[in-house]
Amino acid sequence: MADGGANFSTGSGEPNDGMSGLERLIEIGLALSAERNHDRLTERILLEAIDITKADGGTLYLKTEEETLKFINVRNGTLKIAMGGTTGVPINFPPLKMYNPETKQPNHNNVATYVALTGKTINIADAYEAEGFDFSGTKKFDQSTGYRSKSFLTIPLKNYSDAVIGVLQLINATDGKGTIIPYSPQIQRMIEALASQAAVAIDNQQLIEAQKALMDSLIKVMAHAIDAKSPYTGGHCQRVPELTKMLAQKAIESDDPAFANFELSEADWYELHVAAWLHDIGKVTTPEFVVDKATKLQTIYDRIHEVRMRFEVLRRDAEIKMLKAIAKGKSARVERKKFKERCVELDAQWKFIADANIGGEFMSKEKQDKVKEIGAQQWYRHYDRKLGLAWAETKLFEKAPPADEGFECVLADLPGHSQGEYNLGEILNMCIARGTLNDDERRKINDHIVLTIDMLKELPFPKHMRRVPEYAGGHHEKMDGTGYPNKLRGDQMSLPARIMAIADIFEALTAADRPYKKAKTLSDSVKILYFMKKDKHVDADLFELFLSSGAYKDYAEQFLRPEQVDVVNIEQYLDSKKTPPAPPQPQAQAAQ
């Protein structure tokens, strides 16, 4: 055994003597090209070579980027050793170094590294008599185990470009009766042919894995970019896939008839993984000031500061009016009383406007009228409002009254507030009845799912991933057909899409980083999801599975803050319970 590693292998039964060598190679080549699992592929290569040569054992090495040979599979029949591959037994041998770390010279002393460096096959009849290679490690191993390493066949694995990607080493060929014999030239040629097929199969698989790794990286980069756009939704694109896969696994394990036919192959799992990570890719086009809009007047900044300054001006105008009246000889006591009353009025008005800016569960018509009444008050502006503006915004004021100076309302919807597809009007936004998004902004939020579908449809997904746009694009659909963008009903949606809808909603409910709501407890989030189930917004069977399987608790333990995780009495939410809980307060803003 070269350097204490080459002779660990186990036999694989007798070869098929009724089949010609060519037929055998064709059969093996077809099997290798069809194998998609890396461990099974490398293991089969070694075991087929052992079987053909009636060898006692062997080792398969793969070349690493660090210019070493890594032990991938090790077998020895006599010593009953099987490591690597599908055995689950780790290989703890250090990789063989192809170059001396100090001198940087190629390591030609070890037969396996020599083959990797030169690309030449080495056939040794007896390791103890071989010249030019260091078999001291092999001899030391033999001495400690009582084994006798004798004949070696070490063959390079070369890919399409004739580059060595690994080494196949066989030890102790036998005559079928237990006698160790050298590897014949005919067997050597056959194993070289097998090695060529094996190298192509491994290289193809490595290329596929590299492409998959690249795709995964790009997917995660895009998801991270979406999360990074907002300091408040960071992590959403990472948590939704976790909950999606968690619930999908529970559905597979469930004996509920609703999920009897639900299974996911390895390819199906990857398809769901990609869809979950890309479910919000359309948000890359949604402005941060819409996604993160925490108050009604917030854009890039909160314009409530401008409004507050107008109230400051009104107060100062009232004070100036008082002082002027006193200076003209009017009663100081009366004027100060008027000023004080005006201050109290302005203070109450400002607090009302400030509170309205927060956005709540519902704003009545009376409160909206009060906003307009307060906003109609006027203050005098002395300076030209067109100065210092960008060219595009200056053009918006061309149809407005003269901009040099004059009276203005405390709150107004001005021409300058109409910016492209968004209306930033102050009255319009302050009178939003529920939450903080106006109709334009809510439409833009909803459009992200349309863009998600469109963007994903542009990607040339292979056949086994054609459902990615459907899975990713269905997480805002509802069971009753009132969702968006396509108003699909439950029976028109695949189970993975329905799973993703629950995952997206529950992540948003439990998220502790949203600017427009406080972090909800686990019990509150479950209650809200329950009423969404009652309203036929989410799948009833999946909701019950989400609770009964413990998926809600598993997710909470991994991703919720400790103070959010409280006790949930799930029995009251299952169909078997007759007394439902009281409905939760309506949500101020849809999950973004």
Image (spheres, rainbow, N blue to C red):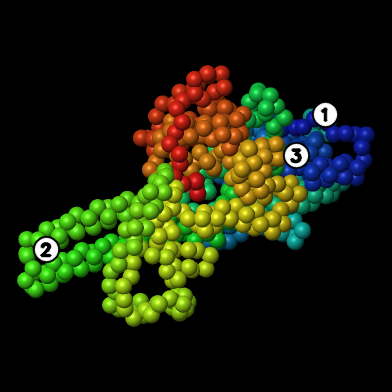
Sequence order check, earlier mark of 2 and 3: 3
Between 502 and 174, which is closer to the camera in this rendering? 502
| Residue holding disc 2 | 335
**CB within 8 Å, label 2 to label 3:** no
Q: Which mark, by number, is residue 177?
A: 1
Mark 2 secondary-structure assignment: helix
- Ranked by sequence position, the earlier of labels 1 and 3 is 3
Decide if residue 490 is on the left or right side of residue 508: right
Residue 119, percent from left and from top: 73, 57
Q: In this view, does 390 lie to the left or right of 26?
A: left
Which disc is residue 235 wearing? none
From this viewpoint, is residue 396 visible?
Answer: yes
Q: Specify the farthest residue to the front.
A: 330
Q: Is mark 3 on a helix, strand or loop?
A: helix
The amino acid type, in three-letter code, at marker 3 is Arg
Q: Between residues 509 and 409, which one lies in front from this camera angle?
A: 409
- Kind of residue at badge 2: Glu
Q: For mark 1, give the secondary structure.
A: loop
**Front tag of 1 and 3:** 3
**For residue 44, which numbered disc appears in the image?**
3
Q: Give the number of the mark in front: 2 or 1.
A: 2
Quarter of the image with the N terminus in it: top right
Location of residue 524 (image quadrant): top left
Dot 3 alpha-carbon crowd within 10 angstroms: few under 14, some 14 to 19, many 20 or more: many
Quarter where residue 187 is shown? top right
Task: Please tell me which residue is depicted at 40% across the width and 35% down the height of the picture.
Answer: 521
Q: Which residue is drawn at 45% across and 71% down?
A: 415
